[in-house]
Image (cartoon, rainbow, N blue to C red):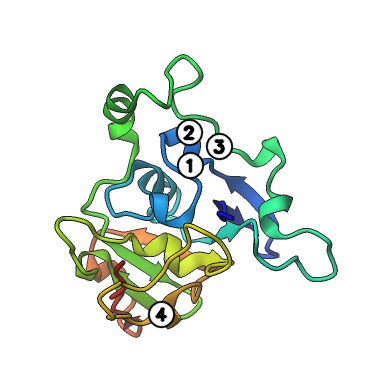
């Protein structure tokens, strides 16, 4: 069966602070239904990381349970008190894609914010360097921070042409402190660039 995901912002102790629902943006809940560079849902999540280092995980509903608990993070974050409400309220249907995307445009991260910075691992990714397949680029943030990949339908699978890229990147930043910045000069000089080279 398909695995559903939700991005969850966390406290330093890995407790949920905020979560988001891809359906509010007309996107699917499966990882590769929304993990694309121009996807408005992922870009809206990024907005919460722009110059605000925050712990984040793209929690899958098939991921392992939390230590000493009978629930995983996806289930723990199901309480509506964590959910960021639909950015336009209930008056505009999230399924009216043209109206919806036009209306939220001022509120989503523009493409100039191209650097993802991991302050725990002292690494960064330039999203512009992801492979481009006929105008489609995978967005690095969901794949770097996901938990539970390869356990359900809609998860990331390597490219069908046999090129795999660095599959070790999948989930490598889960629960780390991530920031989104627009300029390389905003990244500490001792941080290492990681090339996100995954494609489907």
Pinpoint residue 8: horizontal percent, then vertical percent: 58, 53
The answer to which image quadrant residue 158 occupies is bottom left
Q: Mark 2 and mark 1: span between their CA atoms? A: 5 Å
Tell me, for residue 167, which label it has, or none: 4
The answer to which image quadrant residue 87 occupies is top left
- SS type, badge 3: loop
**Is there a contact, CB below 8 Å, between mark 1 and mark 3?**
no
Q: Residue at x 27, y 80 (%)?
A: 163
- SS type, badge 2: helix
**Number of the front mark, 1 or 3:** 1
**Is there a contact, CB below 8 Å, between mark 4 and mark 3?**
no
Residue that extends furthest to the left in the rendered view of this protein: 134
- SS type, badge 1: helix
Pinpoint residue 15: horizontal percent, then vertical percent: 70, 57
Tell me the residue that label 2 is attached to. Answer: 24
Tell me, for residue 30, which label it has, or none: none
Tell me the residue that label 3 is attached to. Answer: 84
Position of residue 163 relative to residue 44, above or below, is below
Pinpoint residue 83: horizontal percent, then vertical percent: 61, 38
Q: Residue at x 42, y 35 (%)?
A: 25
Q: Mark 4 and mark 3: span between their CA atoms? A: 31 Å
How packed is label 2: few (under 14 Cα within 10 Å), some, or many (20 or more)? Answer: many
- Picture quarter with the C terminus: bottom left
Pinpoint residue 180: horizontal percent, then vertical percent: 36, 59
Position of residue 91 relative to residue 161, above or below, is above
Upstream in sequence: badge 4 or badge 3 = 3
Upstream in sequence: badge 1 or badge 4 = 1
Q: Residue at x 47, y 80 (%)?
A: 121
- Viewer-proximal residue, 148 or 51? 148
For residue 175, say whether it is visible: no
Tell me the residue that label 1 is attached to. Answer: 22
Upstream in sequence: badge 2 or badge 4 = 2
């Amino acid at each position: 069966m398909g695995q559903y995901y939700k991005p969850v912002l966390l406290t330093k102790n890995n407790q949920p602070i905020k979560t988001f629902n891809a359906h509010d943006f007309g996107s699917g809940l499966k990882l590769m239904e929304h993990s694309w560079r121009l996807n408005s849902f992922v870009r809206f999540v990024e907005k919460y990381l722009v110059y605000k280092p925050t712990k984040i995980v793209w929690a899958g509903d098939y991921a392992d349970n939390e230590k000493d608990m009978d629930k995983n993070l996806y289930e723990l974050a199901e309480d509506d008190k964590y959910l960021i409400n639909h950015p336009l309220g209930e008056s505009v249907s999230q399924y009216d894609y043209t109206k919806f995307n036009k209306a939220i445009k001022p509120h989503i991260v523009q493409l100039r914010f191209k650097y993802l910075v991991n302050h725990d691992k002292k690494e960064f990714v330039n999203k512009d360097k992801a492979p481009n397949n006929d105008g489609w680029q995978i967005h690095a943030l969901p794949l770097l921070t996901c938990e539970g990949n390869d356990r359900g339908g809609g998860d990331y699978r390597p490219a069908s042409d046999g090129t795999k890229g660095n599959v070790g990147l999948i989930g490598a930043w889960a629960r780390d402190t991530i920031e989104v910045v627009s300029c390389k000069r905003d990244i500490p000089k001792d941080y290492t660039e990681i090339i996100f080279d995954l494609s489907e």
